[in-house]
Amino acid sequence: MKRLLAITACVVLACVTVALAQYNTSNYREQGGARWVVGGSCDVASGGDLDIESGGAIKIAGTTITSTAAELNVLDGVTATYAEINLLDGSVAGTSVTSKMLTLGATKNTDSLDVGYINITVAKLYIGAVAVTSTAAELNKLDAVTAGTTSASLALVVGTGKDLDSLRLDGLINDKPLDYGPYVGEQVVAAVLGTIAVAGVTATDVAFATNQDSLGAVRAWCGTDTVFVAKDGPTSHTLSYQVFRP
């Protein structure tokens, strides 16, 4: 009888050993229960959750994820591609980096920026905390200006000798009306310096003269009741002059 029982026990043990050898456990708890090994998958059923308590951690390849749940939730709804997110990689605050996201510095600054077009639609442009109030059309008056040369519809910039090549004035100076002229047909008979009697003119008035014959330059200035005209060449010329009261 004892011999029969021993044989029976051996057969049962052999069967269990064979069964265990045929079944390879993928998910199991190590001896002592301190660690679970998941060789297959761990599915959380609908309605369930996986709660990492305070002090716990999630690791990927041994690296702990330190982001909080709230920080990870910021990504909820993000549709950016990895290439778009990679634009942040290498970005330096306050420094423009080629092909990287522009991040302003602590004072909302960047070191340099090369742009082809800026459209300011609402706010003003500031330089050194001072608002630029000129319009684009007004600023364009400076485009193609040559110092010392007058150009139609552009700003005047005097040359190195505070000079201009030519200037014709019609109308007002300093919002004051034109007091005299223009008069055409006055004859200057003196060889170099001529005078034109104009009653009421004072030395503080401003005179401009134009040589109607286009035979040399003329310069004009005022004295008491007189407009003085200096001209090139000894012959008399027909002049047109204007006197303004600043």
Image: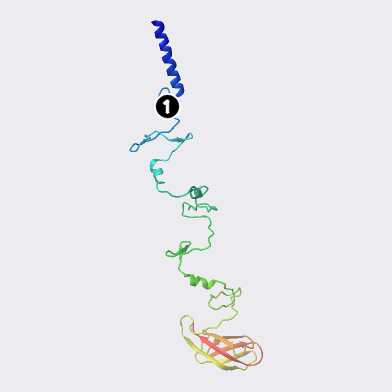
Residue 102 location in percent, x, y? 50, 53
**Residue extending furthest toward the left:** 47
Q: Is residue 38 left or right of residue 182?
A: left
Q: Give the residue type that dot 1 points to.
A: Tyr
Q: Nearer the viewer, residue 161 or 10?
A: 10
> In the picture, residue 146 is in which quadrant?
bottom right
Q: Residue at x 44, y 16 (%)?
A: 14
Q: Residue at x 50, y 70 (%)?
A: 139
Q: Is residue 151 above or below residue 70?
A: below
Residue 91 location in percent, x, y? 51, 49
> Is residue 17 visible in the rendered structure shown here?
yes
Q: Residue at x 46, y 23 (%)?
A: 22
Q: Nearer the viewer, residue 60 or 173?
A: 60
Q: Is residue 147 above or below residue 244?
A: above
> Is residue 92 visible in the rendered structure shown here?
no
Residue 152 location in percent, x, y? 55, 78
The N terminus lies in which quarter of the figure? top left
